[in-house]
Image (spheres, rainbow, N blue to C red):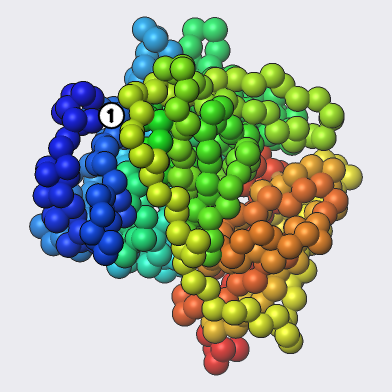
Amino acid sequence: MSDAKALAWSTVRHRKWCAVVLSSAAFAGCSGDNGGPAHELCEQPSEWKSELEIEQPQDLDDDPNVLEVEIEAAVREVEILEGVLTEMWTYNGSVPGPLLRANRGDRLIVHFTNHLPEPTTVHWHGLRVPSSMDGTEAVQNPVLPGESFTYDFQLLDAGTFWYHPHMNSGAQVGYGLYGPLIVDDPDDPLSHEDVVVVLSDVSLDADGQLSPGDQSGWFGDYFGRQGNVLLVNGKVEPTLRIRPSLSQRWRLINAARSRFFGLAVPGGEMIQIASDAGLSDRPLSLERLVLHPSERAELVVTVEESDSTQTTVAFQDVDRFETGRQEPDRNLFHLELDVACPERSESPPEQLASFAPLDLNDLFVRRIVLGETPSGDLAINGVVFPGSADDPAHVGYVGDTEIWEIVNETPNHHPFHLHGFLFQVLDVGGVQWPVRQWKDTLNVPPEQTARFIVSYDDRPGAWMFHCHILGHAKLGMMSVLDIREHDTD
Ligand code: C2O
Ligand code: CU
């Protein structure tokens, strides 16, 4: 539909539309009770997210509650820079890999085949899968070149997730192996249309080809490799169309190896409604979002009406090394402003999700110390992964609730990620976390301590935890949590 047409929708037509959508209780703009004129219907601009579209693979299963797909990892030529073909490592030939999207409660079956020149696995970041499906070297054999593995599990939580390799992951993720996985909540209280935004970067040389994943050796690992080219859904500075006053829901994923994404929308309002794994208890207004490696955020973004027809979402440097300096802002993606909607979208409700009250009394406190060794390795509780057989194991029990206290004794930030279980952050550096929300990654700033609370539901097995600056994991800041049944002691 043309823009003019969309705006010219008559009240009559609007009422008809409302009659349809009200039955699904999905459209907050249709006022029913007071009988007064409802909000003017206004739609997203045509093709509003065509430049950010990520392909969805064919569903091989007729059952509407099963998403069954094939994913092949292979080296393929992809156009990242205009007119240049770059040999990237891809899932199904594209960067990012295909968008997997299903409902909470659905079953996901992925027939995965490795055509890469080296072994790999697929890890489902943030999903509460059975441990045998977690895709780490702790629970499965590497999928060798030419071999296949089928991942098969239920999607227990709604939210914005992603998948990536868990072998040689700094190199493999940096070469392009990552993809989004969205789990929709059939009872989602928000009706804004959404767009998936996968943020990353890639290191390209003068010929537009991938720089080696181990470039600069130890320094690269320790300081965290940042690609010179910023990518939004695999593209350089793509354009998203938006109408002033009409909110969009952005599902952001930081799939970069090391880069912290600071992000601002000039002339726009950002309200964070969700973090890693589903809606927060309440919305939070942001001036600037900082997304650490592997974190997600869902934002309701509303641009104000103005004279301009274009604005640019800026990448703002986060001073990762606390040098006191900041790189200048860079363009991340552009917003083309369409004709404004006559009425502003409703704000997200004051309560988004409910959380059971927390009882912190008498909980076991697991102390995790992030440290450095004199030889320049990184360690967890003094152990450089994989450590030796004599090192004490991290053991927990099904049904238990614990507090994790992450003590960062290093001069660097570490975005800490726990596999398999979602946690709620209590505080960072003694400052209470502003909202209740489910997370799987939490940045622990230099020389600070962060605390979260986690419960182990009935999924025993080996679960990795590590820093998600992937070079740091490689230097040893990684370990395994062994979750056991209480009676198997
Ligand atoms: Cu995205 Cu071991 O993690
Ligand atoms: Cu780290």
Report the side of 359 relative to 457 (left or right).
right
The answer to which image quadrant residue 341 occupies is top left
The percent coordinates of residue 204 (x first, y second) are: 53, 17
Report the side of 2 relative to 97 (left or right).
left
The percent coordinates of residue 459 (x first, y second) are: 47, 75
Q: Identify residue for label 1.
A: 45
| Residue closest to the eye, 128 or 238 | 238
| Residue at 65% in and 63% down | 425
| Residue closest to the eye, 47 or 166 | 47
Q: Can see residue 348?
A: yes
The percent coordinates of residue 37 (x first, y second) are: 25, 50
The residue furthest bottom is: 487
> Residue 315, relative to residue 427: is it above or below?
above
Q: Can see residue 53?
A: no
At label 1, the amino acid type is: Pro
> Residue 207, relative to residue 215: is it above or below?
above
| Residue at 23% in and 25% down | 3
Quadrant the N terminus occupies: top left
| Residue closest to the eye, 77 or 214 | 77
| Residue at 38% in and 44% down | 345
Disc 1 secondary structure class: loop
Q: Residues within 10 Å of mark 1 (few under 14, many from 20)?
A: many
Quadrant the C terminus occupies: bottom right
Report the side of 424 relative to 333 (left or right).
right
